[in-house]
Amino acid sequence: MDIRRATLKDLNLLSDLFDQYRVFYEKKSDLDGAKNFLMERFEKNESVIFVAEEGTVLTGFVQLYPLFSSTRMKRLWLLNDLFVNPNFRGNGISVKLIDQAKALAIATNAAGLMLETAKTNAIGNKLYPRTDFELDEDHNFYSWDVPQ
């Protein structure tokens, strides 16, 4: 299995994985929307995506978005999306994708990585501490959605 940075050539296979990821988070399947969303990220260079590849099959991906810490005066990377096809889980792919994300943070002289996951995400809440992420219990995180 190889972990590498995704390119536009991966768009079709990656779009399918991204759609599966969204369905996992209880969103309606929208393969065309997934493809358009990812195409825009590639075209605008707004994220970094790494894929896990077994032969000609993409088995998983991680997508990171750049942020900045004013107090640290450095870049931060938001590990926003991590997904492994259920048929390939249990093979350490998530850990390898996270390791690649950490390598990106080091290579870009970033302050680190940050992520958020649901309290109900049992798999993620076991995985992240195993990969040296620390749970922040000292801060409240708030969000605001634009009214529809």
Image (cartoon, rainbow, N blue to C red):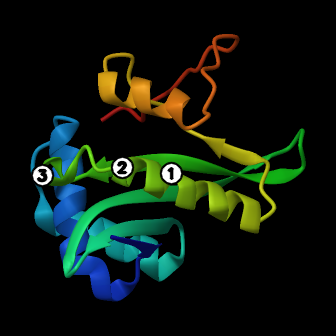
Dot 3: element: helix
**Based on the displayed image, in which of its 4 quarters is residue 63 positioned?**
bottom left
Above or below — where is 138 with respect to 141? Answer: above
**Based on the displayed image, in which of its 4 quarters is residue 65 positioned?**
bottom right
- Marks 2 and 3, how far apart in space? 13 Å
How far across and how far down the image is residue 125, in percent?
A: 42, 24
> The residue under label 2 is which amino acid type?
Gly
Which residue is located at x 84 percent, y 53 percent? 74
Which residue is located at x 12 percent, y 52 percent? 87
The mark that comes first in sequence, 2 or 3, is 3
The mark that comes first in sequence, 2 or 1, is 2
> The residue under label 3 is which amino acid type?
Asn
Above or below — where is 51 with respect to 110? Answer: below
Q: Residues within 10 Å of mark 3 (few under 14, many from 20)?
A: few
Which residue is located at x 54 percent, y 27 percent? 129
- Marks 2 and 1, how far apart in space? 10 Å
| Residue 98, disc | 1
The mark that comes first in sequence, 3 or 1, is 3
> The residue under label 1 is which amino acid type?
Ile
Where does the C terminus fall, quadrant-wise? top left
Above or below — where is 19 with respect to 58? Answer: above
- Marks 3 and 1, how far apart in space? 19 Å
Specify whether residue 33 is in view: no
Dot 2: element: loop
**Based on the displayed image, in which of its 4 quarters is residue 146 positioned?**
top left
| Residue 87, disc | 3
Name the residue carrying label 2: 92
Above or below — where is 96 with respect to 121? Answer: below
User: Is 88 in front, or is 104?
Assistant: 88
